[in-house]
Amino acid sequence: MRRYDFATVDVFTDRRFGGNPLAVFPDARGLTDAEMQALAAEFNLSETTFVLPPENPANTARVRIFNRTAEMPFAGHPNVGTGWVLADRAVDGVLRFEEIAGLVEVRIGRDAAGAVTDSVIAAPQPLTLGPEMDAALLAGCVGLAPGDVLATAHRPVMASVGNSFVIAEVAPEALSRAAPDLAKFRDAAAVFTAPSVTVRRLPIYLHADAGPGQRRARMFSPLSGTIEDAATGSAATPLAALLLSLGDAAEGRWDITQGVEMGRPSLLRTTARRGADGIRATVGGRCVPVLQGTALV
């Protein structure tokens, strides 16, 4: 058998057993696609990452991200956590990861003693918007009434900065009542048409106003094996970009709390800014090391 070292970290938290857990294989050379997928399924986390040499030597690494059932083009907490694990590879505090969705830049913060304080990623693509989803159809998927879905600022809409989600605002008092209905997710996925394979698995990201510069969020993706996610950076980034697009400001910042209902509170710090190619977004936070081990393949 071959031996592959791995580490796990809790992402978007400053305490063990909070945030979103992630497994990282810092040297995945020699693993096949099928083996990576099998290992991700075995860990049974929302995502597992596999680090390979970059195709372009100017970059740090090629990073492949697998959820329980499929490879992903980009994801938030896997990049933040992988950046934390690979922080010693940073050059001038920067890592560059080659991914299916494009190049992901990771900035590593350190304190005066040199300890890592945070990991901040720039999403690989500007904001794009896709089809809108009927509010009643969405509400049924998450166990809410159609009236709980708010359309004052925006209607439920597919949004992406590298990974697609249906993003919907709900009333603050409704967010904690949301509960995914697997059968209704399956029914909705059959009628909600979108070009993205990811969206055909229908990940739904709910957010609610929590005060100036503050949002609460929950993410459900039962068709990909994640009943609920504790922290979803690749949904928080298009949310930040979408919120900025609704006004005239050049840039904005939002702190997003997620995972509270799961008992794994997470804090995602997002920014969005207007640029020449559209609205770009970042997300960052802290991580806590949890496990180190070796997988036998």
Image (cartoon, rainbow, N blue to C red):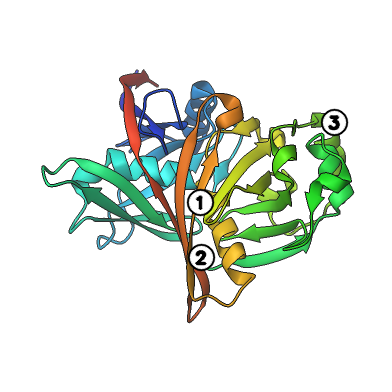
- Precedes in sequence: disc 3 or disc 2: 2
Q: Which mark is residue 74?
A: 1
Give the mark nearer the N terminus: 1 vs 3: 1
Where does residue 129 sit, x and y in percent of width and height?
Answer: 68, 66
Report the residue at 19% width, 44% height from top.
Answer: 88
Q: Which residue is mark 3?
A: 183
- Please give the name of the residue rendered at 47% of the width and 26% of the height, measured from the top-left corner: 39
> Separation of disc 1 and disc 3 at Cα?
27 Å
User: What is the CA distance from the residue labelled 1 to the residue labelled 2?
Assistant: 10 Å
Local crowd at mark 2 within 10 Å, few (<14), some, or many (≥20)? many
Is the C-beta separation of discs 3 and 2 under 8 Å?
A: no
For the residue pair 53 and 284, the one nearer the viewer reads as 284
Label for residue 125? Answer: 2
Residue at disc 3, secondary structure? helix
* Disc 2 residue type (three-letter): Gln
Assign a secondary structure to mark 2: loop
- On the image, the x and y values in percent for residue 19 come to 46, 32
Instruction: Identify residue type, mark 3.
Output: Ala
Image quarter where the C terminus lies is top left
Q: CA distance from mark 3 to mark 2?
A: 32 Å
Residue at the far left in the pictured view: 113
Q: Residue at x 72, y 43 (%)?
A: 201
Q: Position of residue 81 (x, y in %)?
A: 37, 40
The quadrant where residue 1 appears: top left
Circle 3 packing at 10 Å, graded few (<14), some (14-19), many (20+), is few
Question: Badges 1 and 2: C-beta atoms under 8 Å apart?
Answer: yes
Of all residues, the one furthest to the bottom in this rendering is 276
255 relative to 242, above or below:
above
Give the left or right position of residue 113, taking residue 63 as reference: left
- Residue 257 location (% of width, % of height): 53, 41
